[in-house]
Each structure stands twice: as structure tokens, then as C-alpha cells.
Image (cartoon, rainbow, N blue to C red):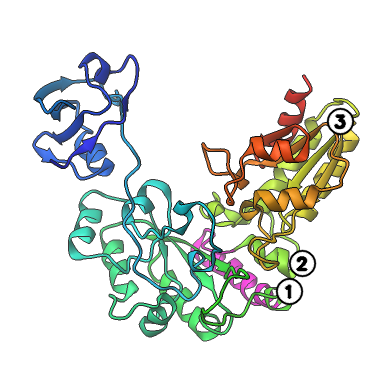
Amino acid sequence: MDGLLIESVVPGSIAEELELEGGDRLVAINGHRLRDIIDYNFYGADTELVLEIVRADGEAWEIEVERGEDEPLGLVFPAPKPMQCGNKCLFCFVHQLPKGLRPPLYVKDEDYRLSFLYGNYVTLANIGPKELQRIKEQRLSPLYLSVHATDPALREKLLGTAGIIPVLDIMRELAASRIVMHTQVVLCPGLNDGAALEQTVSDLVALQPQVASLAIVPVGITRHRNGLPLLQPVTREYAASFIESWYPRGRELARQLGRPFLYLADEFFIKGELPFPPLEEYGDLPQIENGVGMIPLFLEEAREVLSEAVWLDTRTVTVITGESPYHYLASFLQALSRKTGVNFAPVAVRNRLFGDNVTVTGLVAGRDIVEALGGRELGSLVIVPDVMLKEGEGVFLDDLGIDELQKELGCAVLVAESTPWGLYNAVREKGA
């Protein structure tokens, strides 16, 4: 039957007026059979539509719809089931996960549709002519591409996959159709750095402005690499040397191109113990979801909060974080304590689940929080940054829920947006 299963209908919408319901299936629009939500958005953009519906009881309907410009139909569909990744990347984080975590964490997706819809990074190693043609016809732009290396042999080694189409061939075809691409290189010391990185950067610069940005991020290594190829971590010395070499090049590229292009992940500056560039050098933050520019944005917002914060009270609030941003968070909270009277106590949680090489806040597990806070005086409230939790479910990577954490700690726990305003507003509203 194909088509899209309708999950629900927005109250008061056109779909409700048409008496459509969850469990019905939208099969086609204007004669075009639907494969996924992208087809729905693409073929459903007109103001005059003919909908082919199969009701939950099997009855077939054909409905003509006229609607105003940009007036939504009000149909809600489940998220598309991702295409699975067939690569065996040397640095794949999924391969480094311990047993016993939530099953979805072990799913490797490699889906150009999710790249367009949600900004997921894909290698396009599994792309075929039909998929490429669809990307161009439906203007699926921007896409987010994991390049890692433009040298074909090296890229096949990094991806653990032989016989794939050279990534530059695909990217040149997309660029010719004016598809915008944001790219990343996961940097593995001794593998795709040095001359290989020089070539990769040069090749991608040649494809701008369609290649709109390039982020270089350090490889993440957990303590669960049993039976996997040996990888060298990004050390403090390596990070400092890398910034010394590549940060000036990034600035020079920005000068030549008239806009920022090459971005170094925050983790390099944190590991290298070097100051961050000013926020304006990050442009419109195209790579912030990739850990690029988060700390500079945090520092800028922290200045705004401190200029507007008012006196609250004298209670104690514990704020948990990963080890990477601890210095920046602690400095902000110390100043915020002076402004508000609240005794903010930041705690950096050591990552026992993944190991000491993993220090980012978003990969902190619930049980590690319990371990870190054991025996401490927590005050009236523990604040958990939202990036530690699965969106919409309130559970950590190890499936510990907020309610369980609260019981374990014997203290109220509040989830807050992991920004200066998010932290300040959470405490202010909790005390109101």
C-alpha cells in the first residue's frame, strides 16, 4: 500500500474538518505516490490538492482540497525509519558503546533524508543514482556530509568500506545543482591529518560557496574499543599544536572568501587550554550542533545574563556538567552567585561509563551523576542540563530517569536548558 501512516491530526485543522484520523494512510497527493515526509512536503506545497486516503478500516477516499497560502493540512506523521549504515568506520562511536544501553543507541543511520530534515551527518557512501537524482529534483538542501578525507583510498580506509564512489564526484554533482553542503572531518591523529587534511581542505574550498562550511572535530575514543583498531587520542599537546597551525589558516581563508568557512571544534581549544576566538569569527554558527562555537556563544550570553541578573535568595543549588565546559561554567556561576545571592555549586561529572577521554556534557550517564554527587551537600536543588537527556523522554544514556535520579539523590532535580539564560531562569522561576 505504501504511503504515509497518519499518526494524529491537529485539532481545528483542515485534516480534522475532512474527518481524517490517526491510523488512516495518505497514499498520494496529486497523483504522486508518497514515500516519506519529504514527498509529502514537496508534493503537498500547492494550494489545490487531491489527496488519496486509505482509512484505517480499508475504505479508499479521494478528497479535493483548496487551502490558503502556507495553510497547513494539520497531519502529523511518525519520524521516518532511518536507512542503516553499512560502513565500518575506524572511529565509529556506536562500535565503542558498552552493552546494556538503550537499544536505539546501537542503531547506525546513514540516511540523506535525515541529513536534510534534521541535520544528521552522512557519508553518502550508500547513495545511488536514484537518490542523487531525487536530492537534485526536490532541492534537498542543505545537506550535512561527513567527508573525513577527500583522497579516495584514505576515505575507504577510514570508512572501512571498499568500492564506494569518490566523495568529490558526488559533491561536484550536487554543487552543480546548487545543493548547499555543510561538511565535517573527524580528525584521527596520524591518519587524516597532515598532508591528507591539507588536501581535504583545499578540495572543499574549491567547491564553495556550495560547500558552505567545514568543521574539524577531534575523534572521540571510549574505553570500550575492545578488538577495534588502535586510534591515537587528541592530547593537550596535539590540540595546542593543531590550533597553532590551523586557526591562522582558518582566519586567512575567511579573509580570502569574505566569510568564515573553516571551523575548529570547541574541544580543540578546551584540550589545548587556549583562549577561544571571538564569537563573530563563527559567522551564523552553522556548525554549533557539531560542537563548534558553543563555548563562545555561552560566554557571550553569560555576559548578558550577568548584566541583567537580580538578587534572588541565599539558597544552595548544585549544577552538574561534563568535564570539558566545567571551567567556563564555574566562572559564570561564581559571578552569578555574587549577583543573585544563590550559592551555585558546579560539579564536573567524571565519565565512568565511556572513560576519561570522553568529557562532553551530552554523554554523561545518570549513574555517573549519582556517583559524583554521593556524599555531597546538594542544597535545595540539583540542576541537570537538558543535553544529557533523550529529548521528550527524560532519560539518560544508561536509561536512568529523572524520577529515579531524584530518589537516588534525595533532592529535587530540575532539568534546565544548558545556556546561561536557561540556568538563571530555571533558578529564578523555581524560587518564585
Q: Position of residue 234 (x, y in %)?
A: 65, 74
The residue at which mark 3 appears reads as 340
Q: Position of residue 150 (x, y in %)?
A: 40, 77
- Measure the alpha-carbon separation of dots 2 and 3: 30 Å
Q: Are marks 3 and 1 in contact (CB under 8 Å)?
A: no
Q: Are marks 2 and 1 in contact (CB under 8 Å)?
A: yes
Q: Which label's residue is closer to the chain start, 2 or 1?
A: 1
Residue 416 in view of the camera? no
Q: Residue at x 72, y 36 (%)?
A: 407
Q: Is residue 174 left or right of residue 349?
A: left
Relative height, residue 271 to residue 143 (above, below) = below
Q: Which residues are magenta?
A: 241-264
Q: Secondary structure at mark 1?
A: helix
Q: Residue at x 78, y 35 (%)?
A: 410
Relative height, residue 309 to residue 247 (above, below) = above
Q: Is residue 385 left or right of residue 37?
A: right
Residue 431 counted in the magenta span: no
> What is the number of the mark on residue 236?
1
Q: Which label's residue is closer to the chain start, 3 or 1?
A: 1
> What is the number of the mark on residue 38?
none
Q: Residue at x 62, y 47 (%)?
A: 388
The residue at which mark 2 appears reads as 273
Q: Which label's residue is closer to the chain start, 2 or 3?
A: 2
Mark 3: amino acid: Thr
The residue nearer to you, when weighing 125 against 401, is 401
